[in-house]
Amino acid sequence: MTVTTITDAQLAPKDYASDQEVRWCPGCGDYAILKAVQKACAEMGLKRDQTVFVSGIGCAARFPYYMSTYGFHTVHGRAPAIATGIKLANPNLDVWVMTGDGDGLSIGGNHMLHVLRRNVDLNIILFNNEIYGLTKGQYSPTSRRGTRSPSTPQGSIENPVSACSFALGAGARFVARSIDTLQPHLIGVLKRAHGHRGASFVEILQNCVVFNDAVFDRITAKEAAPDAQVLLEHGKPLLFGKNKEKGLRLKPGKLELEIVTVGGSLGGGGGAAAGDILVHDETNRPLAQLLAALEPPFPVAMGVLYCNPATPYEQEVQAQLAAAQGNGDLDALLNSERTWEVTP
Amino acid sequence: MSMVTSAITPSTGRETRDTVVIRFAGDSGDGMQVTGSQFTLETALAGSDFSTFPDFPAEIRAPTGTTFGVSAFQIHFGGRDVMTPGDAVDVLVAMNPAALTVELDDLKVGGTVIVDTAAFNERNLNKAGYQKNPLEDDSLARYQVLKFDITKLTADAVKPQGLSSREAHLCRNMWALGLLLWMYGYERAATVDWLKRKFAKKPVIAEANIAALNAGHAFGETAEMTEHLVGYVVPKAHVQPGRYRTVSGTEGLAWGLVAGMRAAGIGRMVFAGYPITPASALLHTLAHLRAYGVVTFQAEDEIAAIGAALGASYAGSLGVTSSSGPGIALKTEMLGLAIATELPLVVIDSQRAGPSTGMPTKAEQSDLFQAVLGRNADAPLAVLAAASTADCFDTAIEAVRIATKYMTPVIVLSDGYLAHAAEPWRIPREADLPRFPVTYRTDPNGFHPFLRDPETLARPWVKPGTPEMEHRIGGLERDYDSGHISYDPDNHARMTKARADKIAGIANDIPLQTVALGEDRGNLAVVGWGSTFGAIHRAVQIARDEGRDVAHIHIRYLSPFPRNLGDLLKRYDRVLVPEMNNGQLVKLLRAEFLIDAEGFGKVTGKPFRVTEIVQRIRGGAIPPPVREGRGVGGEAG
């Protein structure tokens, strides 16, 4: 067998694909995400031998099998814990956690909370399709009230969790959102997430074509998108609409966002001066919380909601290891404290 | 500065005692653990063998003077092999009425009680539930009662240091220690050194404690004694020459894990745990060993702890996790993943009384089934048990060897008793320890992740980060010949067999089962595992001294069993299996070897007493029910 070594900088997206046949349902949003990740990997020139994809259980969790990097398909909900162990063993590895709404926010919700709080340097990608796909369509922790499913024939009576609000509440220092079909945007978000040192959390709205088809159409459909999404850019005003004619501002006297028209051209409601429109600041956690919680009739925030890096957990562990007293002499350890000699 | 007087005057009136059991008992704040530890040290320095066990309250800060706030420390020491902390107590030091009422049941008839009379005031007597002062009626007539006003004697001794009465009160334990050291002819120098180091920043307190220690000692030595206060001589034990120290089971495991990691040539251990009694002590001990390449990680729960450990093993470190029964139950699913992905992992189980929360501070051996069998599907792994605190060290090393050589999780069974007990330990030199360097595969030619070593059947260990070795593993069944996901029925049967054969094959790589005491055939084999070693061994010794045909067999390797075990057991007419559970090893032996082994379970949360096992050997009769104190059980003196 001849092994041709090519440098990873030359790799194309297809070089990040494994030889395994991809087995998601035809039309599944996961294909688009796989493509975006492989493209992002190629654009960033990631080294396959230094990269590990870790997953739990669910449709999204098949992801590692389809990458030509190292991969570990683990136990339902526990990928953050295993990924943490990998980083504690070898902080130099580039570790991605591929999870879903059930895996990451239900059975693994506790681990998600703590991995974000600790700020382990991981790229955590949560595929949110608002349904349990692999187990054939039960409602998930992100399903909206009223979702009819095999386990909720009369409709779900539970309030959904907002993935990004949860991540911010857990103390995540990088939180972003994108959509499976929003290709250039998604790739950009993935690259930002990868560039961030510490835990980065990316929610991807992903369409389950079989059990929850079109659930995001009111946000993602071509004709709805301009009014239903606000694309975030650091330092830029929060404008949306076909002609960027709408904006978000703080309701006077309240910690609450409101939609206004810019320049008074719409609806006869007067309209706001450009200076009134909020400017996105990625480092502002309260603003990120307001944006994360937006849902229709407000536009849903897409892009980097929050980015404010701090020293990653495993780096602090390394620092403590380096600072530890002692020379690692086992005999000295065993002979520490009081010893005595028994002579023949 | 007080000085220690020179060597003990050999009192002409000293009687010789083969072994002695002392229990120091008092309020949580009376410093009984420290007193016991220092007595142990002086015992060791004098060349005696010993075994100790602390018994402290489950409550973190129990109210003073209450029965549930009693803290005790038991030491069994003497001139012959001491195997357990002792069945029954010879000398009880009771610093208050609560200690007396809680501990008296374990005192031998005719044994000695030493009390501080000042502590027997109305308030303390009420708290301990005494209607009348037991020092003033005949309720203690069966014992030798030595009544001293230790409070006042201590206060007098520390007067020169000008302490507050509260500070002076805290020196009472050193007075009692001084008296006991005199009673057994032991030195005080190590305790004086220790006090100076401990109170280096408070020299007045150090001096006061040394003064109290010396005063207690002088009290014994001078004529102030009653006719019952006599000195004893305990002969030196015949032990192998070398350098010794005390070791607890927790220390033995921690250092054994470090030694194992180094023997395997692995640069880093990731120990992930979640707080649980009595396993947390291992996390605490290892947290101080970062200079040895130990990363400790307090995870958010038991599942994350084993997950992080497994992730670390996947990445090429030694992954270790630890818990007690309920926590091990939570780790079960991840153990299945470790078995499926064939990664090395060491899991320490400090067993405690259950089910559920049970009695967290009480020891039991009831996780054997959980360790050997407690997983979904056919999921074999290796199980070892440590027999003593010193054996914890060797067992941990062996666990690392098996885990890394066979790419498998290994469960090490310890228990709440071993975790806290301490014994003298001949310190090994690292150069003399076994070495078993691991090899990480780096050669991509012909590689797939589930290629098996023809001898061990282990798959290769590949560190992520190795060029051209990228591969995917997971919990889904994988093809025997390629490592890719496979739902093929025949392949699953083949893989199930491969996993079973791999674990079974470990039997060819472990020592044959030996007989710990007695002949390798005969009338009766008493078969144990884990921390019951001392009690069984001593009981078999006693029975053999009576001329009985009985042997002691102690099993370290519980999965797989040593390959000669079945044949060995079949050479005895009877097999008796004492264990601290309702009959687990006995069922495994019966199932595995079709032998008519008899169970002998004890589930009181307390270790076996030697006498219980002796009685069972003698007649097979169940010992008469006696109300036991909360003593630790163990060996007849």
Image: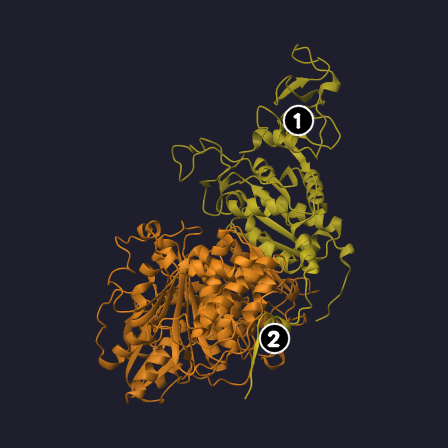
Chain colours: A yellow, B orange
Kind of residue sitting beneath label 2: Ala
SS for callout 2 = helix
Camera-nearest label, 2 or 1: 2
Kind of residue sitting beneath label 1: Pro
Q: Check chain identity for marks 2 and 1: say if they share one.
A: no
Residue drawn at 38 percent across, 76 percent down: B230
Q: Which mark is residue B464?
A: none
The answer to whether residue B192 is left or right of residue B627 is: right
- Give how far across and how far down residue B31 sits, in percent: 47, 59
Location of the C terminus of chain B by quadrant is bottom left
User: Which chain is disc 1 placed on?
Assistant: A
Question: What residue is disc 2 on?
Answer: B263
Res B583 quadrant in image: bottom left
Up-down: is B524 above or below A72? Answer: below
Residue B245 visible in the current orientation: yes
What is the CA distance from the residue labelled 2 to the residue labelled 1?
63 Å
Up-down: is A57 above or below B189? Answer: above
- Give how far across and how far down residue B86 sits, in percent: 37, 73
In the depicted view, which residue is nearer to us: B337 or B362?
B362
SS for callout 1 = helix
Up-down: is B118 above or below B565? Answer: above
The answer to whether residue B241 is left or right of residue B24 is: right
Q: Classify mark 1: residues with Cα within 10 Å, few (<14), some (14-19) or many (20+).
A: some
